[in-house]
Image: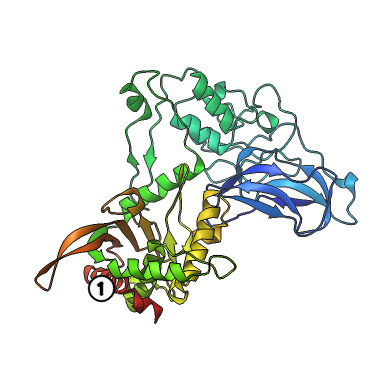
């Protein structure tokens, strides 16, 4: 019997992804470590390696298929000694879902199209999992009857969600995916063509809510569109990254009680030290570096967390997670969203190490080539908008962090020092903190420790 290759979980939170590209063909021999496919998650494109040696007997999911669930079979592999004739025949249409005593009101996703015994009936109200397969696409999406007598539409979860949000009747769309499956591009094409929507369909955006609390409904899409003249805007469908950002930050503001603390840091000494260190730094070779103000901020925040361990925490219902290291995430803007790559154990690294590591992470973030472990986790974050001329702002905490530091632009200002007027370079730094995990006094202690370090950078070198 052939061995199934499953859609991998490329991160702990991944539920589905896009099979962007196959790098093997049917009949091709592969060995462990060979790259067989590229998978796109919400934030990155990653390569999938073969685990076993054998011959690719079938590619079950076509290139470009979106919404492929984790652990869905995407290909089969004949191992040494396997009989190709033993490969089971696959049906040309999806199997009907098992009958339910209480069918849900919404049309469920189709059951996997396989000739093997049908899966056990899912719990009432939950749709059967979809397993897209690669084959010649019929003219219209295949349908079959359900226990409730309703037609079943063969469509990806992402296509269903997009159609629902924009009030499209997905049953009217012709699918271009495997076996006529309606996929994302079919919904986007329908939106672009301005195809009619059923009058009863009203797409209402649901904001994520904390467990045990009702969802908060935003303004319905049809009412939003009614505020603007037709033809006065272009509708750009949200990609996976934008949706994840919206969900996580909505969750943050709904479930995390934020409070804010601001200090003005004088960074004249830091600027002089930075200039001196960059002037004497190697310009080429593996030891070359060029320090930025942000590198000093990363180091200062990491050391401040080490000095105030009560702030280096994460809230969980089971108890407070107090971290042993300072893993600092840094927001990096890219087209269509942002990444927050993490500098691990930043309190133990030199400024030059932080600078070079951050430069590498930022470059790969802009190409969407970061691995999940490089941008997930962390114990705190920094968001620096100083380069955009923003004087000060309050950042939204990135769950599961308990703090985030917002850094504004550095500008010269008049100061009173020892009853004398001086001109100094000030930089506003605002700490957003989760009041469940960090009390006001602890937050103030953390921010003052950061201020002491950033104003006297020699302390970071000891």
Q: Is residue 457 above or below residue 209?
A: below
> Height in image: 45 above or below 309?
above
Describe the colour scheme in one phrase.
Answer: rainbow
Residue 132 place in picture, x, y as percent: 67, 39
Neighbourhood count class around disc 1 (C-alpha, 10 Å): few under 14, some 14–19, many 20 upward = some
When the figure is inspected, residue 445 is found, relative to residue 259, above or below; the finding is below
Task: List x then y, in percent, for residue 437.
Answer: 31, 67
In this rendering, the answer to whether 270 lies above or below 144 is below
Task: Tell me, yes or no, if residue 279 can be seen here.
Answer: yes
Question: What residue is drawn where x is 41% and y is 22%?
Answer: 200
Q: Does residue 98 appear anywhere in the picture?
A: no
| Residue at 22 percent of width and 71 percent of height | 441
The outermost residue toward the front is 279
Q: Residue furthest bottom?
A: 462
Say which element carries label 1: helix
**Residue at the spot 75% in from the left edge and 56% down from the top edge:** 50
Residue extending furthest toward the left: 419
- Between 311 and 247, the one lying in front of the other is 311
Tell me what residue is drawn at x 63 percent, y 52 percent: 46
Q: Which of 405/179 is in front? A: 405
Residue 281 located left or right of residue 45: left
Q: Nearer the viewer, residue 3 or 365?
A: 365
Quadrant, the C terminus = bottom left
Q: Position of residue 59 (x, y in %)?
A: 76, 42
Residue topped by disc 1: 445
In this rendering, position of residue 8 left or right of residue 250: right
Say how many tags the image has: 1
Q: Residue 69 versus residue 365: which sits nearer the camera?
A: 365
**What x and y, as percent, mark residue 52?**
79, 58
């Amino acid at each position: 019997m052939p061995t199934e290759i499953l859609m991998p979980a490329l991160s702990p939170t991944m539920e589905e992804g896009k099979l962007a590209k196959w790098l093997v063909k049917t009949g091709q021999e592969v060995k462990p470590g060979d790259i067989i496919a590229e998978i796109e998650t919400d934030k990155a494109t990653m390569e999938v390696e073969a685990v076993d040696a054998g011959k690719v007997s079938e590619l079950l999911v076509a290139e470009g298929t979106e919404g492929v669930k984790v652990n869905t079979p995407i290909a089969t592999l004949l191992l040494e000694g396997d009989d190709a004739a033993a490969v089971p025949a696959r049906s040309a249409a999806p199997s009907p879902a098992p009958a339910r005593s209480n069918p849900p009101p919404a049309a469920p996703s189709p059951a996997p199209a396989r000739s093997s015994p049908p899966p056990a009936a899912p719990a009432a109200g939950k749709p059967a999992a979809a397993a897209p397969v690669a084959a010649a696409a019929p003219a219209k999406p295949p349908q079959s009857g359900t226990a409730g007598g309703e037609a079943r539409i063969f469509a990806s979860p992402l296509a269903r969600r997009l159609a629902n949000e924009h009030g499209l009747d997905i049953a009217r769309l012709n699918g271009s995916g495997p076996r006529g499956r309606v996929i994302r591009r079919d919904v986007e094409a329908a939106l672009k063509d301005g195809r009619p929507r059923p009058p009863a369909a009203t797409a209402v955006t649901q904001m994520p809510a904390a467990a045990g609390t009702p969802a908060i409904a935003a303004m319905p899409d049809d009412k939003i569109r009614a505020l603007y003249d037709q033809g006065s805007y272009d509708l750009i469908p949200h990609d996976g990254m934008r949706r994840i950002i919206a969900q996580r930050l909505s969750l943050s503001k709904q479930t995390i009680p934020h409070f804010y603390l601001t200090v003005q840091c004088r960074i004249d000494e830091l600027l002089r030290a930075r200039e001196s260190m960059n002037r004497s730094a190697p310009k080429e070779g593996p030891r070359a570096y060029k320090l930025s103000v942000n590198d000093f901020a990363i180091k200062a925040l990491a050391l401040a967390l080490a000095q105030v361990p009560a702030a280096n925490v994460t809230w969980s219902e089971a108890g407070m997670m107090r971290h042993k290291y300072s893993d600092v995430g840094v927001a990096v803007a890219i087209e269509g969203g942002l990444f927050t790559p993490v500098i691990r154990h930043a309190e133990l690294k030199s400024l030059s190490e932080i600078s070079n590591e951050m430069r590498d992470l930022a470059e790969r973030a802009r190409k969407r080539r970061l691995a999940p472990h490089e941008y997930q986790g962390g114990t705190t974050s920094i968001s620096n908008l100083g380069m955009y001329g923003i004087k000060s702002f309050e950042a939204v905490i990135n769950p599961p962090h308990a703090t985030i530091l917002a850094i504004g632009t550095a500008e010269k200002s008049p100061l009173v020092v020892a009853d004398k007027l001086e001109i100094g370079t000030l930089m506003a730094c605002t700490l957003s903190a989760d009041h469940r995990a960090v009390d006001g006094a602890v937050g103030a202690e953390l921010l003052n420790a950061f201020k002491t370090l950033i104003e006297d950078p020699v302390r970071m070198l000891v």
